């Protein structure tokens, strides 16, 4: 069997989807910035077809399509972001509660190992940001999976997380937030490992309330800086 076979178009589109997602989440494209299929295809070194498919998958998640204007990165207002975080707090609080009841011992050990890896990340260690790349690297994703509830997974991982992922990374860049978030993650794992649903839910809700406070603070600071530059 030869490994030198043509790459399926679907594989290229999948890779384009993941790379484009990471580029948007990490801030290479600003909220509201227009995305050109031709320019993205040039930068990725591929045809426009896979880019079009990737953008289609991201519609309603990280990008929006406007008639006559094309595709652009989502740009949530402060009010909309607060609404989404209120939903996130309720759902992830439930996920932590269920995880305390259903998580396995190996999964608890994996969570401890994951947070050790996060703590060793240069950005986290320097308190400049806390970026969690893929699903397996995402602490909150692991908690939701440990809850053993398919409907909860669907609501959080397929519908809510994409909209929030862009802002989760940016809020973690607030001075002092990365290290604080890591410590809050450790408190959540401690509560889950103790098999205490009430403590686990309370720790998760507290963490997300702190996160939205940081997010709103960042957005307000960005707005002030923008206004100053325009005057």
Image (spheres, rainbow, N blue to C red):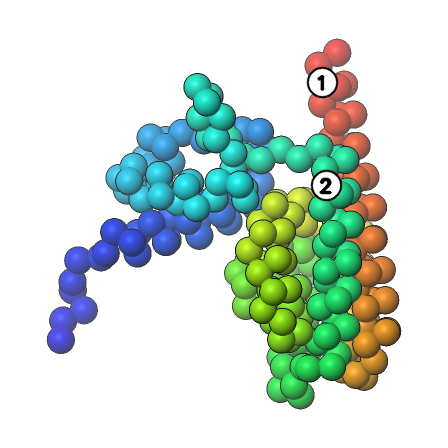
Label 1, secondary structure: give it: helix
Label 2, secondary structure: give it: helix
Q: Residue at x 72, y 41 (%)?
A: 81
Q: Is residue 80 above or below residue 145?
A: above
The answer to whether the residue labelled 2 contacts the one labelled 1, judged by CB atoms less than 8 Å apart, is no
- The image quadrant of residue 181 is bottom right
Closest to the observer: 30 or 179? 30
Q: Is residue 90 above or below residue 185?
A: above
Q: Residue at x 74, y 70 (%)?
A: 96
The residue indicated by pointer 1 is 229
Q: Residues within 10 Å of mark 1 (few under 14, many from 20)?
A: few
Precedes in sequence: disc 2 or disc 1:
2
Q: Is residue 200 left or right of residue 26?
A: right
Q: Residue at x 77, y 35 (%)?
A: 79
Measured as percent of width and height from the top left, residue 115 is found at 68, 71
- The image quadrant of residue 76 is top right
Closest to the observer: 144 or 225? 144
The disc at residue 81 is 2
Q: Is residue 191 above or below residue 85?
A: below
Is residue 175 in view from this perspective?
A: no
């Amino acid at each position: 069997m030869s490994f030198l076979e043509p790459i399926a178009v679907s594989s290229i589109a999948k890779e384009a989807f993941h790379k484009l997602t990471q580029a948007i989440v990490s801030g290479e494209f600003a909220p509201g910035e227009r995305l050109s299929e031709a320019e993205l295809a040039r930068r990725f070194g591929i045809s426009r077809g896979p880019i079009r498919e990737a953008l289609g998958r991201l519609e309603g998640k990280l990008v929006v399509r406007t008639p006559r204007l094309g595709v652009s990165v989502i740009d949530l207002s402060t009010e909309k972001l607060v609404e989404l975080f209120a939903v996130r707090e309720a759902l992830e609080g439930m996920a932590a509660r269920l995880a305390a009841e259903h998580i396995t011992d190996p999964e608890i050990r994996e969570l401890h190992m994951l947070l050790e890896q996060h703590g060793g990340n240069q950005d986290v260690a320097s308190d400049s940001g806390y970026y969690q790349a893929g699903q397996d690297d995402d602490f909150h994703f692991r908690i939701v999976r440990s809850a053993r509830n398919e409907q909860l997974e669907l609501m959080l991982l397929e519908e809510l997380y994409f909209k929030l992922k862009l802002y989760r990374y940016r809020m973690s860049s607030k001075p002092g937030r990365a290290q604080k978030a890591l410590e809050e993650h450790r408190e959540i794992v401690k509560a889950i490992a103790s098999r205490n649903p009430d403590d686990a839910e309370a720790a998760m809700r507290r963490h997300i309330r702190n996160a939205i406070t940081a997010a709103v603070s960042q957005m307000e600071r960005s707005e002030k800086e923008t206004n100053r530059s325009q005057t």
